[in-house]
Structure formats: structure tokens, C-alpha cells
Image: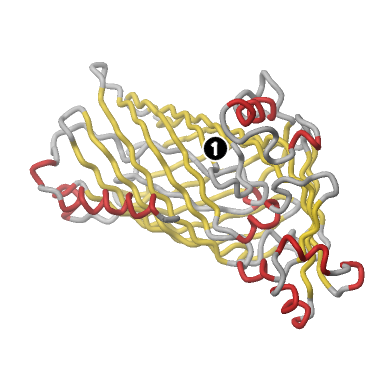
Amino acid sequence: MKNKPLFVFVFCVSFTISYSQQSDSTYINYKNGISKPSLLATHPFGIFFTRIQGNFKTRPNKKTTINLSIESGNVWSAPITAYIPNDEALREQVRQIPWHGTEFAFNVDEIDAKRINLSVDGVLKGFRANLAYKINAQSEFNFGIRTFMLTKGKAPFTLLTGDQFIEGFHDNIAGGNDPFARRLFGLDKAKILYTDRNNNTLEINNGDFFIGGFETSYYYYPELSINSFKNFYINFGAHLGINLSKYNASLDFGISTNILKTYALNDLKYFQFGLSIGVLRKNGIEFKTNNIDFGTNKYLGYLENIIEYNFISKRKTTHSFGIDFYLQTSLNKKDEFEYIIPIRNGVSEKAWITGISNLYKNNNYWTFLYSFTRKTVTTTFYLQQDLNVNNNPDIQTGASITFGLK
């Protein structure tokens, strides 16, 4: 069942909420919610617009808090061209043919169609900074910046996310020899090239650094009797993103709802369960007419769930181990894939369709993270995996530090 992780998680949350009040400890020294920096994947399109993720805190931090993070993700898709017929009669003809046969059924030079070109290769490095400011006991304002750089991902600056490591993993552990034909095009390359259906072109080369944009959020934490009664918390978010790259100058708007449940095993060990859901209006306001088209869906929904186990050491350090699942709706409207005509690159024979086809699929990935918290400082490390190979990095790693200001 495709949504099995979600059902299992919801069951766990429901179980712990309904469990006896006596199981909850009222004197345990909980940290303020789940320790989680930005876990958003360095998707080659997603880095150019705002995306929302879960805020699993019980309340605003007492002090103004700063989070600094770095991430590294290997992105890849073979060069591919796709044609989108304008004529409805031709679209109906394409629908009758399996997608892998359409390139042989039509002469694309003679049809009326829009065209998309896409080629992705390299390691995207992300650098983020976020400031959280307490407005009052029930509300908080967040301001952040996201920046990125494309690299070849060579050692020693890149280890787990480099081409050599990933293809070595495929050869010796899982995947088989060159499962995505990456070696056919050469390892340790860095270039992202995309021409959208309106003939606007995005080109990023090795060493290119750019600011993706600024992100602001307002969170409201209502005071409910269930907070202390069941260690159950909820908060609501309103989000505004300002995209500043030359490829997308626009404003994004979004809302989110975040739920947190804490369940104590004893006075030194406890679990936390988080569930977040929200929606984003992408490019709600555009500052120029030739923005790159990063998808035909104007609204993007997401669902995130996380489980975290915590134990407090004798030195009063909280060690946290978490598993996070993130799901985002597709960038393109799914019905369009039924009538596009994808054309493979002459060299690639393996997984050549994925660069385009995955733009019509829901986007999801798993993240495994560890953090340790001492007083007001939290340090986090994570490893992320796109098990469905849907244009997110094959492997992404990240580290962050969060600390309060005096």
C-alpha cells in the first residue's frame, strides 16, 4: 500500500493520544518540541520557490533563536525532451499509445506542440539561516534566507553525496551497474539546463552561487487544556516567501497546521510524534513576465510526519533520534502526462524518462536525523534518501546548529 507509512504513523499518534493519562509524566524536563532544522530536499526546481515544512514546537522559544544549516544533495536526470501537443485531437491520439512508444509514433518536427528540455547533473550545496523571534507567549515570527551553489561534488569536500560514492554503492550493495546511465555521460559533472514550455531557459554551471529567496512565517500557539493534560500541542502557521533569483522573482503564500504529541516512558526517556499539513500558493504575485515555469500546479500541498525518541543523559544533554517522512503534491498536473511525447537522448537507455515523468508525480522522501541538545544549543545531523527516485537527491546530508541569543 503506497500510503502505508502515513497510516502507520496516524495509528501511532491516535494510540498515544488515547492512552491513559497516567502514562504521561508531568515533571519530565522536555525540550521545546522536536529538534528539526530544514529538511527540505535540494530539488533542482524546488530550490527556486518557497516550500513549507513542519514546525513541531510546543511554544515560542523564550529567547530569540538562530538556526544555521548546510546541506548537500546529489541531483541527476539524463537529458530528455518532451513535446506537449496543442491540438486536442492529437492529444487524444497520444493517449491511446503507451508513453514509451509515442516517440516512434509521431514526427515531432511536424506537429503543433510546446517543448520542454531538461538535463540535471551535479551536487547542490544549500546554506540556510533562520531567525525565530518571540512576539508574545502565544506567537512567534520567523525570518530566513536560502542560498545554493552547484558543484561537481568531488572529495574531500563531498563524501556521501558524490558521484563516485553513489555509483560505488549501486555497484556493490544495491541498484546494480550504472542503473541510471550516469556513467555514460561522465561522473563528477555539474550542469543544470532547463528550457520551459514558454522557451525560457535556466542554466546553472559548476561554481554558480545564487540566492533562492527569503522566507517569513508567523506561528500561533493556542493555549489549550489538553496541553498539560495530555502533552498534546497544536500550532498554526502563515507563510510568505520572497523569491529573488533571476529565474523566478515572485511571492509565495501558504498556511500550515502542526500537531505534536509527547509520550513519556519515564523521567529520562520519551517519544514525540509530529504531524504537519499545509498548502502553498506558488507564484501568487509575479514581479516579471518571463519567470521560469517550474510546474503547472499553482497550489502545492504537503504532509509531513515525524517520530523522535529522546533520552536525557546524566550530564543533562538530550539525545534525539528521529525518522521523518515528507510528501508534496506534483509540480505538474498529472493528466498532462497522458498526452506528452517524451524523446530520449540517443545515448541513454536507462531511466531516461524520469527527469520529466517525475514532475507529474507526488514528491516524497525519508530523513533519518540525530541531534543533541544542551541548554539552549541544539546540533543536528541528518541523512536523507529519495527511495522513489523522483528528482530529489539520491542522497542528501545536512548539519545544523540552533542557539539562543542573550
Which residue is painted at 40% across and 31% down in the image?
404
Q: Residue furthest bottom?
A: 89
Q: Where is residue 293 in the image (x, y as percent from the top left)?
A: 72, 61
Q: Can residue 68 be seen in this view?
A: yes
Which residue is painted at 73% across and 49% down in the image?
352
Q: Which residue lies furthest to the right in this view?
A: 110
Q: Relative to residue 196, is residue 128 drawn left or right? A: left
To which residue does mark 1 refer?
129
Task: Reply above or below: 296 against 357.
Answer: below
Q: Where is residue 274 in the image (x, y as percent from the top left)?
A: 34, 47
Q: Closest to the observer: 124 or 384?
A: 384
Q: What residue type is labelled 1?
A: Ala
Picture quadrant of residue 195: bottom right
Q: Can residue 290 be seen in this view?
A: no
Picture quadrant of residue 30: top left
Q: Position of residue 66 (x, y in %)?
A: 47, 35
Q: In which quarter of the image is the C terminus?
A: top left
Picture quadrant of residue 158: top right
The residue carrying pointer 1 sits among few (fewer than 14), some (14 to 19) or many (20 or more) residues within 10 Å by Cα, namely many
Q: How is this picture coloured?
A: secondary structure
Task: Reply above or below: 87 against 106.
Answer: below
Which residue is painted at 71% across and 53% down in the image?
353
Q: In which quarter of the image is the N terminus?
A: bottom left
Q: Closest to the observer: 303 or 285?
A: 303
Q: Relative to residue 91, is residue 404 drawn left or right? A: left
